[in-house]
Every structure is written in structure tokens, then in C-alpha cells.
Amino acid sequence: MSPEQSHSLIPHYFPSLSEQQLQQFSELEGLYREWNDKINVISRKDIDKLYLRHVLHSLGIAKVLDFQEGSHVLDVGTGGGFPGIPLAILFPQCRFHLVDSIGKKIMVVKEVAKALHLNNVKAEHARAENLSGEYEFVVSRAVTRLKPFYQWVKAKIQKEQRHPLKNGILYLKGGELQEELQEVKKKHRLYSLSDYFEEDFFETKYVVHVPIYP
């Protein structure tokens, strides 16, 4: 098994994982292969690189911010559970609300969370703009351009601050982003994932932080 296929990528970059977390991460591949045979939530070419392109990519957010205990995080357009499921494993003392507009994908998320005993995950078939709760951060993996995404979620961010980064959006994006970021017309900061991960896959991958409140 090549390094990019192996769950050993995860403890390499996150060496302080508990035995339970290591076990949960190791079970992800089998669970997603099983469910992908029934419902295609990950592309066929990506399922063999699950830990690189989905799990580790999701955990790029954790290199940018260490969520405080009790944090409430919303994952919009989670698809098969990314970035929410890997983050929920890494931060068991935080609450993660994973939503997607496609019901069959949420069904997979619920089953994966159940199999891993992730009691800190709530999965819901819903659109972000219809939610009523408040969260410290909204995370996502490039479900749309940042400008409409910002409009969907800006009212969902609570004002009380307790993190080094101000409450807001942590968005996983790739490629050339200058034009898209100019559309938002909000203060933001770009974090290059190649600063944290050495694999070529991350050369053009970023976490975009957009604070909601000044």
C-alpha cells in the first residue's frame, strides 16, 4: 500500500491521536468502500486515495485552528461527511452539525457516524439557509463560489469569540482564488496547505478564513 492510500498519513501529521482516534481513522476506508458500492459519495478514482484527498484534506482545517472544547461547528454541503467526519474524530469534545441537500448522502453520513460511535455528530438533510442555529465556525469543501456561500451562512455565526481566529467561515478551496476572493469584498486570510503537508496534492489547496464580525 502506498503512503497516500494508507491511514498512516494521519498519525504522521497528527502524532498525538488516542488509540480510539487511531482506530476510528483506520475504519474510515472500509466504511466508505462499503457505502460507496451502494451510493456513490466519493468518485471511483478518489476512493483509493481516501486518506490523502478526503481525510487529510479535511484535517487541513485543524492545522489552521484548534477548536476549543465545546465548540459548535456547522459543515455545509458535507456530501459523504467531509470535512465534518474527520474533524469530529479529531475534536471529540466539539459538536459538529453536518448538513447536505441530498438525502442519500446524509444517510451515509449517519451510518458512518453511527459505526464510529461519533456521538458529537448530528447529520441532517437540510439547506444551510433554512437552519436556525448559531455556530462559532462554518466549514465546507468548495460547495460553491465563496460569495453565495457567505450569504447563506453569515447569519449563522455567533458573536461571542473565544478562538485565536475570529468566528466565521473556514473554507477548503483549490486553484486560482484571487478573482473569487475579490467578489466577497470581505477581509479574509488564505492559508496554504502546502505549508503543513508535503504531498504534491496540496500545492494548490488552501483554507480560506473569512471572519463574519470585525
Image: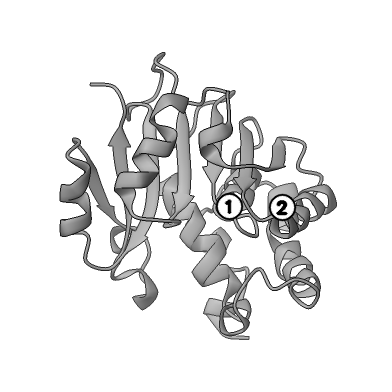
Q: Residue at x 52, y 22 (%)?
A: 134
Residue for badge 2: 106
Q: Residue at x 57, y 24 (%)?
A: 132
Circle 1/circle 2 CB separation < 8 Å = yes
Q: Which mark is residue 78?
A: 1
Q: Find numbered disc 1 in the image and state the secondary structure of the residue it sits on.
A: loop
Q: Residue 143: where, in percent of width, then height?
A: 45, 56
Structural crowding at the residue carrying mark 2, measured as other residues with C-alpha within 10 Å and reported as few (<14), some (14–19) or many (≥20): many
Amino acid type assigned to the residue bearing label 2 in the image: Ile
Which numbered disc, 1 or 2, marks the residue that appears first in the sequence?
Answer: 1
Q: Residue 166: where, in percent of width, then height?
A: 32, 26
Which is more toward the observer, 120 or 43?
A: 43
Q: Which mark is residue 149?
A: none
Please say if 38 is above or below 140. Answer: below
Quadrant holding the N terminus: bottom right
Q: Residue 12: where, in percent of width, then height?
A: 51, 62
Please say if 152 is above or below 78. Answer: above
Amino acid type assigned to the residue bearing label 1 in the image: Thr
Q: Is residue 144 left or right of residue 22?
A: left
Which is more toward the observer, 30 or 97?
A: 97
Q: Residue at x 27, y 51 (%)?
A: 191
Q: Residue at x 63, y 37 (%)?
A: 97
Rounded to the nearest whole Å, what is the CA distance between mark 1 and mark 2? Answer: 8 Å
Q: Is residue 88 left or right of residue 206?
A: right
